[in-house]
Structure formats: C-alpha cells, structure tokens
Image: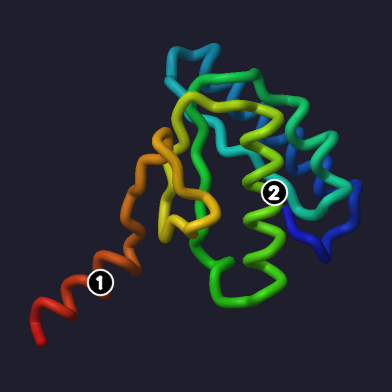
C-alpha cells in the first residue's frame, strides 16, 4: 500500500494480501502477518483484519531516510502495537529508537549486512 495510491487500490491490495495468507494457511503453510498501512485514514481498515497478540513482522527498509516516510512508519507502528498488541515483532531492517522494546527481534536487512561487511574489510 502506498500513500499516493487511490484508497480503493490500497483496500484491494490489503484484500489480496489477506486472501493469499489465508490460502497458504489453509494449505499448511505457516504465515507471519505483516500489518500494512499507508496513511492515518488506513489505520481503521488495515489493522482490523489482524488478530490480537501473536507474532507480526514489520520492515523499516526504505522508509528511514525521508522525514515524512519515517514519521508515517513510526506513527503506524505505534498504532499497530496499540491495536494488535503483538507478543513479538520481527523487525526487518533498522529498529528506530521509537520502536524498541522487549518484544522486538531485529532481523538484519541485506543492506545492513553489506554495510557491516564493508566496515570489517576497511
């Protein structure tokens, strides 16, 4: 979902995401949901499709360099925490200080691994 997409297209993309996850679950594949949102208006309809608790995934990749993107990501992340109350969050990419917590597990992104490798080779 993207802030510059029409609302109908974002809702359709959420539907496709949920449909595919349910298809995989019905066929015995374990799915970790990644709640999506695109703007403040999307919070109501994008978080309502997720059960409370459990494990969720989040990704900060691609949203940390632009001030507006970062703000939307962090505000949406906090809203997700309040509404879904996940037991565990698998955070792919940098964990912003506003998103740190005992239930957050950092998973290094490909970019972070490359940056780490360059540092070791210097």
Whether 122 is drawn above or below 54: the answer is below
Q: Residue at x 71, y 35 (%)?
A: 16
Q: Residue at x 63, y 55 (%)?
A: 74
| Residues at marks 1 and 2 touching, judged by CB atoms closer than 8 Å | no
Horizontal side of residue 37 vs 104, given as left or right: right
Task: Look at 55% across and 31% down and name the residue there.
Answer: 33
Element class at badge 1: helix
Residue 90: give its label: none
Graded by Cα atoms within 10 Å as few (under 14), some (14 to 19) or many (20 or more), the crowding at tag 2 reads: many
Q: Mark 1, mark 2: which one is toward the viewer?
A: 2
Of all residues, the one furthest to the left in this rendering is 121
Residue 114's label in the rendered image is 1
Work out whether residue 83 or residue 2 is closer to the camera in this orientation and state it. 83
Q: Quadrant of the C terminus?
A: bottom left
Sequence-earlier tag: 1 or 2: 2
- The residue tagged 2 is 76
Q: CA distance from mark 1 to mark 2?
A: 28 Å
> 78 and 1: which one is in front?
78
Q: With 121 as the anchor, is 12 left or right in this view?
A: right
Q: Indicate left or right for 110 with 118 as reference.
A: right
When the figure is inspected, residue 1 is found, relative to residue 61, above or below; the finding is above
What residue is at 51 percent from the left and 32 percent from the top?
Answer: 56
State the SS at label 2: helix
Residue 80 percent location from the top left of the image:
66, 38
Q: x%, y% of residue 37?
A: 73, 47
């Amino acid at each position: 979902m993207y802030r510059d997409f029409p609302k109908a297209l974002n809702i359709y993309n959420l539907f496709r995401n949920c449909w595919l996850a349910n298809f995989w679950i019905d066929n015995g594949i374990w799915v970790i949901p990644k709640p999506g949102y695109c703007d403040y208006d999307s919070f109501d309809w994008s978080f309502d499709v997720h059960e409370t608790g459990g494990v969720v995934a989040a990704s900060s990749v691609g949203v940390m360099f632009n001030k507006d993107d970062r703000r939307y990501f962090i505000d949406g992340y906090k809203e997700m925490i309040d509404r879904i109350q996940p037991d565990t969050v698998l955070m792919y990419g940098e964990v912003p200080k506003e998103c740190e917590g005992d239930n957050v597990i950092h998973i290094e992104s490909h970019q972070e691994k490359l940056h780490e490798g360059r540092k070791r080779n210097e």
